[in-house]
Image (tube, helix red, strand yellow):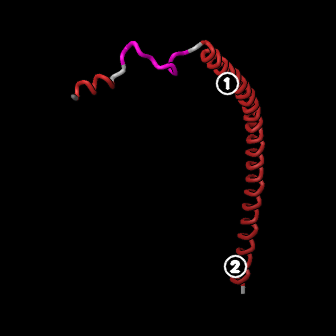
Amino acid sequence: MSTSNSTSRTPSASRTRLSTVPTSATKSRQLSHLHSQLAQLTAHMADLENLLRMTAVQAEGMRGLGGYAGGMFMAASKVLGEETVSGAGVAGASSQNSASKAAEK
């Protein structure tokens, strides 16, 4: 009883589904869809190439700005460093003067 049931449920090799048989209309529709996807991919790749070019130009500009900013920091450090040294020298001299005046009294 079970053998006749299992043999009737297995698909035969000669039987094929109609949904899996490719027709010329299906193939042409799929090829058309693939062609449109390829065109879209090509357009996106061209956009990406342009964006990468612009990014490279902007990176060069950023490099220049970094050089200017570094120069400004170095100049500010030099100016502020001289003021600090001069300020410490003036403060040190005034404290020495007050100490010597106190010793004289």
Location of residue 71 with respect to 25 vertically, above or below: below
Depth order, front residue of 30/6 = 6
Q: Quadrant of residue 46?
A: top right
Location of residue 104 with respect to 68 vertically, above or below: below
Mark identifier at residue 100: none
Please state if 2 lies on the left or on the right of 13 as rendered: left
Locate the N terminus by quadrant.
top left
Name the residue: 61% across, 12% down. 24
Please state if 94 lies on the left or on the right of 5 as rendered: right
Asked if the residue at tag 2 contacts the one at tag 1, i.e. Cβ–Cβ closer than 8 Å, the answer is no
Mark in front: 1 vs 2? 1
Identity, as a three-letter code, of the amino acid under mark 1:
Leu
User: Residue tagged by mark 2?
Assistant: 99
Q: Residue furthest bottom?
A: 105
The magenta stretch spans residue 13: yes
Magenta residues, as a range?
12-22
SS assignment at label 1: helix
